[in-house]
Image: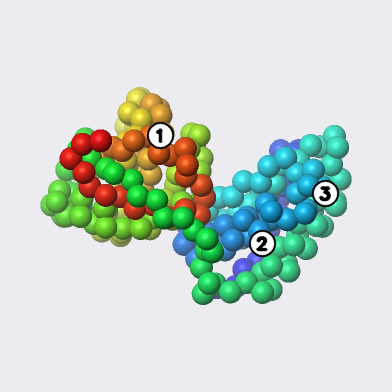
Amino acid sequence: MGFSYEKYFVGDSCLCWSFGDVIDTELNTMVLSLYNNLKVSDICSELKILDIVPSYKSISVYFDILESDIKMIDSAISGFFDKYLEGYDASEGLQGARVLEFPVVYDGEDLERVAKQNNLSVDDVIKIHSGGEYQVALVGFKPYFPYLIGLDERLVTPRLDNPRVAIPAGSVAIGGAQTGIYPEVSPGGWNLVGRTNPELLKAVKPGDILKFKECKDL
């Protein structure tokens, strides 16, 4: 896969570099590799960057509009990305990724719905979901909410037509082709398949690999 990017402003104090338009492990791995290298570079301190935020396909750079030279930020970071992409080797994968295991009690309200939607048994859903490895593509929506890439196609399930007003903290859920964990009580329309300890999410960072281990109690 060849990579190029588009740039655009998000408000007046954030410049975003977008590298594609799909949710894809290879694309996200490249974005996270760029992110990991940019955040430890001298550019951040020299240009007084306030924050760098990765997503599935893009990197947003936040700065103080009153103190920053926007043209210099654009030039320096674009140059950094250009140089990195010239030597990028996709076969190396995401260097230094941590593997984190989360215990999950599979007793979610929508477990049977996911099974029925995909012509599977509940046991099949549990086995497939707990047997996967999931890359943390980004953290967002709520603090510590991990969006995970790697859901088996057999478990892809549409979001609920009528989202719930309050989903319990620690709920493990499936929404479309993604799975994730709710860090706190919040509204949401994803299918609930289980629950885990939400405190574990505080250690999760983009690029980590999550595994789920079925358990009977937390």
Give yes or no for contact between labels 1 and 3 (Cβ–Cβ under 8 Å).
no
Mark 3 neighbour class, 10 Å CA radius: few under 14, some 14 to 19, many 20 or more: few
User: Sequence-wise, which precedes: disc 1 or disc 2?
Assistant: 2
Task: Say which residue label 1 marks.
Answer: 199
Q: CA distance from mark 3 to mark 2?
A: 23 Å
Q: Secondary structure at mark 2?
A: loop
Give the x, y percent position of residue 149.
42, 55
Q: Quadrant of the C terminus?
A: top left
Mark 2 neighbour class, 10 Å CA radius: few under 14, some 14 to 19, many 20 or more: some
Task: Say which residue label 2 marks.
Answer: 5
User: Sequence-wise, which precedes: disc 3 or disc 2?
Assistant: 2
Q: Is residue 12 above or below residue 130?
A: above
Q: CA distance from mark 1 to mark 2?
A: 36 Å
Q: Is residue 54 left or right of residue 215?
A: right
Q: Amino acid at mark 1?
A: Glu
Res 170 quadrant in image: top left
Q: Amino acid at mark 2?
A: Tyr
Task: Say which residue label 3 marks.
Answer: 46
Residue at 62 percent of width and 56 percent of height = 36
